[in-house]
Amino acid sequence: MRAAVVVFPGSNCDRDLAVAFEQAGFQVDMVWHKDAKLPEGIDIVGVPGGFSYGDYLRCGAIAAQSPICKAVVEHTERGGYAFGVCNGFQILTETGILPGALLRNAGLKYICRTVGLKVETSDSAFTEGYNAGDVIGIPIAHHDGNYFADDETLARLRDEDRIAFTYTENPNGSRGDIAGILSHNRRVLGMMPHPERAADEGHGGTDGTALFRALSGVLTPA
Amino acid sequence: MKARVHVMLKNGVLDPQGEAVRHALGAMGFDKVEGVRQGKVIDLELAEGATEADVAEMCEKLLANTVIERYEIELV
């Protein structure tokens, strides 16, 4: 299994994400934001957390226009798998791969702590290692994680069972308590919490491990 | 030519920063402020031949996120 992890200026969870993929059995290539192509034959591309381009203009807005993001968009359009965490989720919404947007936290504060996440669906390559209804502990670390989508989009996400995770106690004002969503073909997951920071005993929790293990068992390259 | 782009959150999208400013103004004694919305102003210096349509395309593709924001273009 092969994964690529994109590195932007200002990414700071790229290595954590690569290690989580590696521990689940992936061979990982790091890909620089100026590269116009993803490596051949990868099974999934990871878009990591951080502060790409200093969060200038809007979180993820400038990263979304980078050469590598055009390749990520093409990869997902071919049916390829992608996984965006935190700033990576913001970038995936800015590219239009995932619907909605991430606004400033309703309480205006940067929040860094472990929160409860309810698994809303086990029907995806990312979440099939959990049971729907499971509550897992995963850290969040964000200032702009307040998920917004209009009523019509929210209804569509619900009807199509595309809400992957919700917060058990909404920390940031997200509509519908949404913490992570799936693309229409269920092959792209974007989430604000950091499962790669709960993937080793040394992290203080391993509830994120099941996500990476599930991925390593089921992917087919695009 | 210069263009000034105003980017504001759409009506109905919560603006927590605007709300914080409103609270602060209230606490300072400005008791006639009923709402605050905070936005961005982006000034563009444009080469000869650039059009308002070019600026609109820039807004659609980068300067504004039309999921949550609306924009107005002022040519100056």
Image: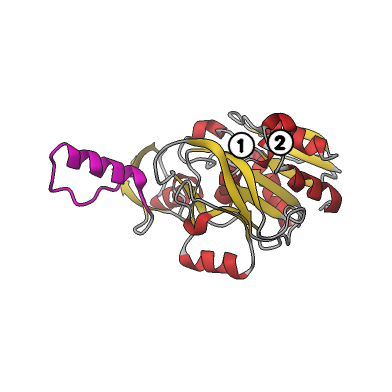
What quarter of the picture does the N terminus of chain A occupy? Answer: top right
User: Which residue corresponds to the image point at 19% horizontal and 52% vertical from the top-left?
Assistant: B34
Name the foreground residue: A212 vs A87: A212
Sort mark 2 into few (<14), some (14-19) or many (20+) by Cα contacts within 10 Å: many
Q: Residue at x 34, y 58 (%)?
A: B11
Residue at image point 56% right, 45% down: A90
The reply to whether discs 1 and 2 touch (Cβ–Cβ < 8 Å) is: yes
Residue B75 at least partly seen = no
Dot 1 amino acid type: Gly
The answer to whether residue A118 is left or right of residue B21 is right
Q: Is mark 2 on a helix, strand or loop?
A: helix
The answer, for residue A166, to whether it is visible in the render is yes
Do pointers 1 and 2 mark residues of a single chain? yes
Q: Is residue A116 magenta?
A: no
As for residue B36 lying within the magenta part, the answer is yes
| Kind of residue sitting beneath label 2 | Leu
Observer-nearest residue: B5 or A156?
A: A156
Q: Position of residue B75 (x, y in %)?
A: 31, 46
Which residue is under mark 1? A49
Marked residue chain, label 2: A
Q: What stretch is highlighted in magenta?
A: B14-37
Mark 1 secondary-structure assignment = loop
